[in-house]
Image: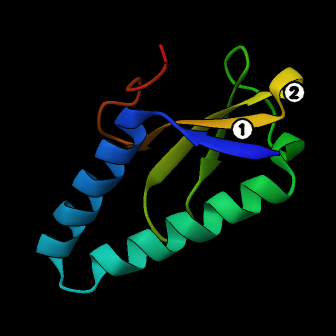
Amino acid sequence: MNRWFHPAFEVELIEAARYLEHQRGDFGRQFLNEVEAAIGTIMEAPARWRPWPGDIRRFLLSSFRYTIRYRIRRDEGLVEFLSIVHTSRQPNTGADR
C-alpha cells in the first residue's frame, strides 16, 4: 500500500515537534522519531487497529500523548494519514477530514 499525508497532518506534526522542542531540547527529535516508527508500524498492517468512529483508525504513540488518525482506502491501495493530535487537547481535530 502507498501512503498519503493530509496537508494539515504535516502542519500538526511540525507544530507538535516545535512545541516539544521548546519544552526540552531533545523532545522534538524524539517525537519525530517515534512518529516515523509509528507510521512504519501502521504501514506493515494498517488493518490491525479497528475503525473508530466510522472508517477512521487511531494509533496511540507510546512515549508521547499523541494519536495518529488514519484511514485505509483499499480500492486505491492507500493509507491516508489524516491528523496527529494531543490526546487531551482538541481531541476532535481532523475528525472531519
Q: Looking at the rendered structure, which numbered label has been put on residue 95? A: none
Residue at screen point 43% across, 56% down = 65
Taking the image as shown, residue 75 lies to the left or right of residue 12, namely right
Q: Residue at x 41, y 23 (%)?
A: 92
Q: Which residue is mark 1?
A: 79
User: How many numbered circles does the render carry?
Assistant: 2
Q: Nearer the viewer, residue 83 or 75?
A: 75
Q: Residue at x 67, y 18 (%)?
A: 53
Task: Give the numbered dot on residue 74.
Answer: 2
Left or right of 65? Residue 22 is left
Residue 74 horizontal side relative to residue 89, left or right: right
Tag 2 and tag 1, C-beta contact below 8 Å = no
Which quarter of the rendering shows the N terminus? top right
Measured from the top left, where is residue 96 in percent x and y? 47, 13
Give the mark nearest the N terminus, 2 or 1. Answer: 2
Indicate the position of residue 51 as horizontal and vertical percent values.
76, 27
Q: Quadrant of residue 17?
A: bottom left
**Circle 2 sits in a helix, a strand or a loop, which is it?**
helix
Query: What sort of colour scheme is used for the picture?
Result: rainbow
Q: Residues within 10 Å of mark 1 (few under 14, many from 20)?
A: many
Which percent across, then down, holds residue 63? 49, 71
The type of residue carrying mark 1 is Val
Q: Amino acid at mark 2?
A: Arg
Q: Residue 49 location in percent, x, y? A: 80, 42
* Extreme residue toward the left, this view: 22
